[in-house]
Amino acid sequence: MADASAISAPDASSSSSSSSTFSYFAVFYNYPLISAVVSFAIAQTIKFLTTWYKENRWDPKLLVGSGGMPSSHSSTVTALATAIGFCEGFDSSLFATAAILACIVMYDAFGVRLHAGKQAEVLNQIVYELPAEHPLAETRPLRELLGHTPPQVFAGGVLGFIIATIGQIIVRTVSNV
């Protein structure tokens, strides 16, 4: 298991150190945070490139939007929980908290948000069929791509686990040099 001080910033090596050694740059040495952000970025980039390949169009909204394959929400929280497990131990309270929160986010992605997207699709169809003189006929359509299917959530989780594991291998390699 990696020692937490091995992945900390050089001047932030002790949590009990005085405020004179505090550094804002320590965030760049936070392996769980970096794993989560990298995992999110890779998941969103995969969606962007997949759309470009399949539909031959660039859609920059996909770099920050929700929905699609793989789930960036699942990828992010899985990478965070896995990285915390590597750093703090898989028997730690911090890992347990991160794992439970990851499960909640992943359940929400294919549960509540998926059904909200399906409801938006039905509501948009109803509004589309309204007569032109109806006050709601010109209503802007609701976003339909909100949630994920279980395979999208699973793929995001696998991606997050892989990113955190690769990050752990890098951290161990760098700390052993």
Image: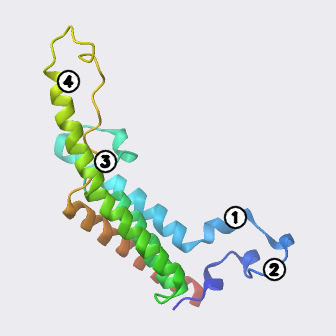
Where 37 sits versus 60, above or below? below
Quadrant location of residue 116?
Answer: top left
Q: Which residue is mark 2?
A: 17
Closer to viewer: mark 2 or mark 4: 4
Q: Residue furthest left?
A: 129
Label 2 – label 1 distance at C-alpha: 16 Å
Task: Give amino acid for label 1.
Answer: Phe
On the image, the x and y values in percent for residue 9 come to: 69, 74
Dot 4: what SS?
helix
Dot 1: what SS?
helix
- Asked if labels 4 and 2 touch by Cβ distance under 8 angstroms, the answer is no
- Asked if labels 4 and 1 touch by Cβ distance under 8 angstroms, the answer is no
Could you tell which of marks 2 and 4 lies nearer the N-terminus?
A: 2
Label 3 – label 2 distance at C-alpha: 44 Å
Q: Mark 3: give few (<14), some (14-19) or many (20+) Cα within 10 Å.
A: many
Label 4 – label 3 distance at C-alpha: 30 Å
Task: Give amino acid for label 3.
Answer: Phe
Closer to viewer: mark 2 or mark 1: 2
> Closest to the observer: 156 or 55?
156
Left or right, residue 111 beside residue 38: left
Where 40 sits versus 176, above or below? above
Q: Mark 2: give few (<14), some (14-19) or many (20+) Cα within 10 Å.
A: few
The disc at residue 127 is: 4
Left or right, residue 102 beside residue 10: left
On the image, the x and y values in percent for residue 149 come to: 20, 57
Could you tell which of marks 4 and 3 lies nearer the N-terminus?
A: 3
The disc at residue 25 is: 1
> Closest to the observer: 37 or 151?
151
The disc at residue 48 is: 3
